Image (cartoon, helix red, strand yellow):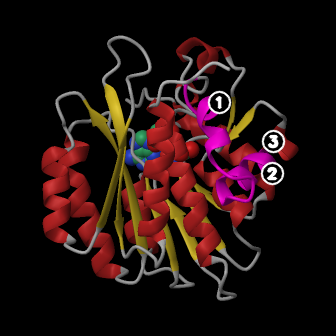
């Protein structure tokens, strides 16, 4: 039974981390004319309303994108996708990763989105009706294996599970190794939470052993409320594109600026 709903968390600092990196990678890949494939294994509903009861209740966007947006220059691909999403869906909307991809990609590119939760899938299907995307209500890893190697072969897969089931941590390195075996040129970006107790530790060890050239990037931030266990956000990238490491260093600097005490004029 799936109970995770991203609308409670959309626009939090983990989203800022993941979505800024995603927007940059897509921007980099589309500098070449050659078409590409984008596959997302855990898509969510695609667009979020930051004024929804759920978003207001957790206050995660207020402690996330509301504070972090100004740290990105206006010409950063993430800032551009945020502006385009607001123009299309209203000033209090926030783009999930499928919308960031749809806005950043071209008609010649192919998008596949998997979302298993019936309600989230229905929202995604409605939101994506004009995006030219293939929306699947299917297990994300099952779809990933069925689609790889994709046509076009050049491309990116975002893997953003909700980690509701502890077994996810154990299964992910195996899934990623199977996908990479079938699609050795594909860029795979995995997001993981950094929780009190470091549940992600053994998974990262297995990933680093399987992908010694993988790029790991983590940012830390204070828990959004007392008792909240998320202390940071991580990305593990297989086949990182040129320039990603430098871009992630800039992200580290931006997140560091967030934790500096603010001076009042
Ligand atoms: N990637 C989205 C974004 O950044 O906007 C957020 C995705 S959210 C963290 C994870 C989503 O995965 C949830 O909407 C959940 O319903 C969905 N999900 C959970 N298990 C799944 C599975 N086995 N296959 C596909 N989707 C799944």
Residue at the image point whose x is 87% and y is 45% from the top: 87
The quadrant in which residue 201 appears is: top left
Q: Main secondary structure of the magenta part?
A: helix
Q: Tell me if residue 137 can be seen.
A: no
Q: Which residue is mark 3?
A: 86
* CB of mark 1 near ligand 1 (< 8 Å): no
Q: Position of residue 1 (x, y in %)?
A: 37, 29
Residue 49 point in image, percent of width and height:
71, 29
68 vs 39: above or below: above
Residue visible at 44% across and 29% down in the picture:
4
**Compared to 163, does 5 lie above or below?**
above
Q: Earlier in the sequence, mark 1 or mark 3?
A: 1
Query: Residue 261, how many percent across, how many down?
Result: 48, 24
Q: Which residue is mark 2?
A: 84
- Does the CB distance between marks 3 and 2 fall below 8 Å? yes
Above or below, 265 against 23 in this view is above
Q: Secondary structure at mark 2?
A: helix
Q: Report the magenta residues as a range.
A: 63-85
């Amino acid at each position: 039974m799936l109970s995770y709903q991203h609308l409670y968390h959309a626009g939090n600092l983990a989203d800022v981390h993941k979505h800024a990196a995603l927007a940059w990678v897509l921007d980099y890949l589309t500098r070449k004319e050659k078409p590409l494939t984008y596959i997302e294994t855990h898509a969510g509903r695609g667009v979020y309303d930051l004024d929804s009861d759920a978003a207001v209740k957790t206050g995660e966007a207020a402690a996330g994108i509301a504070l972090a947006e100004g740290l990105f220059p206006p010409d950063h691909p993430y800032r551009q996708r945020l502006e385009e999403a607001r123009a299309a869906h209203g000033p209090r909307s926030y783009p999930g990763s499928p919308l960031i991809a749809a806005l950043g990609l071209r008609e010649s590119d192919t998008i596949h989105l998997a979302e298993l939760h019936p309600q989230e899938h229905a929202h995604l299907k409605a939101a994506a009706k004009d995006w030219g995307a293939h929306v699947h209500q299917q297990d994300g890893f099952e779809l990933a294996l069925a689609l790889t190697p994709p046509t076009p072969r050049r491309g990116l897969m975002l893997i953003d599970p909700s980690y509701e089931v502890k077994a996810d941590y154990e299964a992910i390195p195996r899934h990623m190794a199977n996908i990479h075996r079938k699609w050795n040129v594909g860029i795979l970006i995995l997001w993981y939470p950094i929780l009190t107790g470091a549940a992600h530790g053994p998974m990262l060890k297995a990933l680093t052993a399987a992908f010694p050239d993988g790029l790991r990037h983590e940012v830390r931030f204070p828990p959004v409320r007392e008792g909240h266990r998320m202390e940071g956000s991580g990305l593990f990238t297989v086949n990182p594109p040129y320039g990603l490491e430098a871009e992630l260093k800039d992200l580290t600097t931006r997140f560091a600026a967030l934790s500096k005490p603010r001076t009042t004029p």
